[in-house]
Amino acid sequence: MTDLFSPMTLTRGPAWKNRFMLAPLTNTQSHPDGVLSDEEFNWLTKRADGGFALTMTCAAHVEARGQGFPGQLGVFDDKHLEGLTRLSTAIKAKGAVSSVQIHHAGSRSPKELVGQPVCPSDEPKSGSRALLPAEVEALRDNFIAAAKRAERAGFDGVEIHGAHGYILAQFLSSEINKRDDKWGGSLENRARLIFEIIDGIRRECRPDFQLGLRLSPERFGLKLPEIHDVVTEILSQGKIDFLDMSLWDYAKEPNDEPYKGRTLMSYFTDIPRGNVRLGAAGKVMSAKDARSVLKAGCDYVVIGRAAILRHDIVNRIRRDPAYTSPPTPVTIQHLKDEGLSPRFIQYMRQWPAFVEDEPAAA
């Protein structure tokens, strides 16, 4: 098993000093127009200072109408460059590799933020309308432009968000994507947009720009064997540098009955990956969990809620091989001490039993 604190080289871009990546975490802290706030800057740079090899931003939307939540960081306009440049500079000054997760929420965009959401196909349930072919091409180009903007801002790379039922995952889903053009029908067609974005970023950004992809293999109309096939092709092409599999729980079995009997993660660690690095996210809450992810065949581990609970979880694991996260719920003061703003803390109240209830007024 690879040690959690051994450096990791990638095909392109800088090496990671250890095997820990900060998960791209929704935090609702930036300004309504997508401009970086001091609160989000502090949240992310505190994690870079806490020992992460790769510090990833939250999902940053590539189109205004792709916004997924209030206070979302933007990367769709040059007005975002000043804040993004400040952020990339500070993350790298802390010794971490810097990356922006590029994202579009599709039919999951709240109407109160974007008006009418868009989707691969008309979706009465969400009130979303189908993208016209020219709009699909524009969406592809906007993902590529966002990566170029992140590069101009000094980031080491980007991660394409193809998971969690957002627009690229919507294209992948045969339940959601009912198109009859070159982006619909067969799995090859439904995956086409992701491959076009990867090719465009490789073409438009510098040769050593580090490119990652996040996928999830279940829920939101996704089918495990199809995602397995997509991953197999992506890894065989070698155009990305790292694949980030979001599994909900790194130790779980698949939801689909025919595939139970082994872990969901094992379906991806078994795929030949060449020089692409593979990581997994999902309830990694302790040093033991992190070691288990590497022991199961991954190259690195992705830390989400445990990094909310302790900004310096990586440094704590380095000092204590038996480290485990604090039990939840935690106090508001605990989260303030870990660099969360009142807005972020309010967002975390949506997570069951994560934040203690405030005492009732006397």
Image (cartoon, helix red, strand yellow):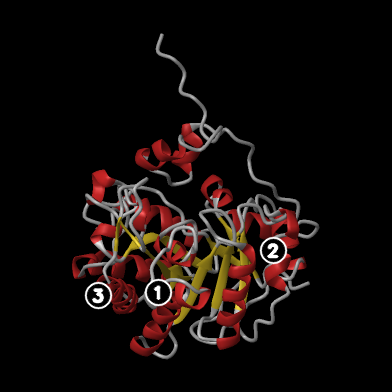
| Nearer the observer, 109 or 346 | 109
**Circle 3: residue type:** Ala
Whether residue 320 is visible, yes or no, is no
Residue 138 horizontal side relative to residue 174, left or right: left
Q: Across the whole image, how many numbered discs are drawn on residues?
A: 3
Residue, disc 2? 265
**Which residue: 50% across, 63% down?**
174
Q: CA distance from mark 2 to mark 1?
A: 28 Å
**Circle 2: residue type:** Met
Front of the two marks 3 and 2: 3
Numbered badge on residue 134:
3
Callout 2: few (<14), some (14-19), or many (20+) C-alpha neighbours within 10 Å? many
Contact between marks 2 and 1 (CB within 8 A): the answer is no
Q: Position of residue 271 (x, y in %)?
A: 69, 77
Whether residue 242 is visible, yes or no, is yes
Q: Position of residue 32 (x, y in %)?
A: 23, 50
**Circle 1: residue type:** Trp
Numbered badge on residue 183:
1
Q: Is residue 174 above or below residue 180?
A: above
For marks 1 and 3 on the same chain, the one whose residue lies earlier in the sequence = 3
Q: CA distance from mark 1 to mark 3?
A: 12 Å
Disc 2 secondary structure class: loop
What is the residue that sits farthest to the top in this orientation? 362
